[in-house]
Image (cartoon, rainbow, N blue to C red):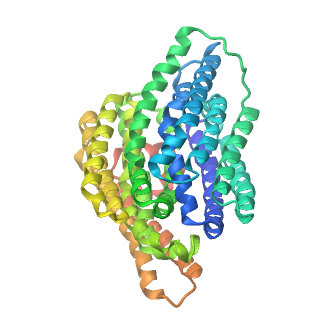
Amino acid sequence: MSKIKSLVSGVGWGAFSTIAVIGFQLIFMAIMARLLEPSDFGLVAIANVSLRFFGYFAQMGTAPAIIQKPKLEQGDIAAALSVSLGISILFFLILQFTAPLMEAFFKMPELGLVIQVLSINFIIGGLSAVSVGLMRRNTAFRAISIIDVVSYVFGYGVIGLAAAYNGLEVWALVAAFMTQSTLTAVLSYAVTRHSFSFRHSREQRRHFFSYGGRYSIIGFTEFLASNLDALIVGKLLGTVPAGYYNRALLLANLPVQQPANILTKALFPIMSSVSDQHDKQIISLQLSTLFVGSYAFAVSAGIYFAASDIVKVLLGSKWLDAVPILEILTWSVGPLYISHVAGVTLDSMNKLRIKLHIQLSMLFLLVALMLWLVPTGNVIDIAIAVVITEWCRSIIMTIKLKKILRASTKDIAFIWLCIAIIAISSGSFIELVVRLVGQNVNDAIKLSLEILAGASGLLLGSFIARYIAIRLPAVHFLIERSSLFAKLFPKLA
């Protein structure tokens, strides 16, 4: 398969999976938000944060280590499985003993038992990490997409909704999550079977400990920076505010997270056609920042203006306290995904030390902001601290990469101008609908009109921005290699 066909395949199957999962997720979210209470979501949110605290080390980055290894030799799979499963079992046992301490710390009844049950997923993940890594290594987009959809729909759409309808409360969410992860593991192994042998050399095991260890440390630092807010909300304000915050955070990121990941990953095959490593990194960074940034800022601008209608339609009237939280958090989404693109670039350059220093600095900044703002006891102030941190992270990463890659200031300015045009256009169209329609129209109809307006604004903004984007060397590169993209941009002079 050619690089362009690989790109189209990646985008196509990734888009199918994303659209399907997001669509089902919105439907299930709307139903379960009406069957369950904010405190149920808050309890599971804190449990998941507690689990992820250990989760970055539980599998030692086994899947990424499989993906990045140039050649898999006999014994590598056994080494990966041994490391992944062994560490996962260790952390499962640790959580069985520490869960009651976490319950006492957060002062949340049932939290300990929920954590103990959910920690079984460490073992499930340890067993499936090799299969998942092999599928990604082999770019099995179709299989990955189908597994994502099937496991999510069955886990949440069948088991989760049935359990919630029958009054299982927080355990409905636990059952849904457990079912999804188990089905993902089973289907992944069915698609990519491998030996369950544990015979391997010390050198092979050392590779997975070395790469996976560094990967886990950086991931753990990023986890602390991105979850400190949820921990503080849960600890100081309780399960109900934690539930509001969790749903607001999900609504702010859900429409952006998976599409952004697809755009980033799908550009990977086409980049391999660039022989010069420096040019490859510049082109990849420019294209990813342009596409991901434009989409992320446009969607977050739309969510800001439509926040009230989004919460009313998707969550219901009892969740209205989440509206102001959602409005604040939307301002963090754009810079968050710009930072994600920059982080991927630093990974590809093996600049893990620089990335770690930036993440640690942002963690200290967030802690300082929390110490300053948290005494107010206002969840809005916590959200503001998150927004400030994400903008600082994005600016610092951009400056650092500009210096490392000797990137053109003019090109960076063009990219940000394109992003601004598209975001302003999308947000303005939605704000216009909000003002014209008023409060007398059904919320679902009003939200539908806002979505159509936002999409129209995004298209208009993209049409205008393409006259600026055509000045970027990365866009020239893309046009020269794809007739599809050539049709979307003005003719080159």
Asked whether 165 or 235 is in front, the reply is 235
Residue 300 percent location from the top left of the image:
42, 63
- For the point 33% across and 35% down, the residue is 355
**Eyeballing the image, is 82 above or below 355?**
above
Residue 316 percent location from the top left of the image:
57, 74
> Does residue 181 appear left or right of residue 66 in this picture?
right
Query: Is any part of residue 451 visible from this angle?
Result: no
Residue 96 percent location from the top left of the image:
58, 36
Q: Say which quarter of the image contains residue 29.
A: bottom right
Residue 9 percent location from the top left of the image:
62, 44
- For the point 46% across and 69% down, the residue is 322
Query: Is any part of residue 43 visible from this angle?
Result: yes
Asked whether 101 or 59 is in front, the reply is 101
Q: How many marks?
A: 0
Asked whether 154 or 493 is in front, the reply is 154
Q: Quadrant of the N terminus?
A: top right
| Residue at the extreme bottom of the image, as rendered | 440
Q: Say which quarter of the image contains residue 445.
A: bottom right
Asked whether 239 or 192 is in front, the reply is 239
**Eyeballing the image, is 486 above or below 67?**
below
**Eyeballing the image, is 488 above or below 80?**
below
**Eyeballing the image, is 92 above or below 438?**
above
- For the point 41% across and 66% down, the residue is 325
- For the point 53% across and 22% down, the residue is 69
> Does residue 465 appear left or right of residue 205 in this picture?
left
> Does residue 186 appear left or right of residue 417 in this picture?
right
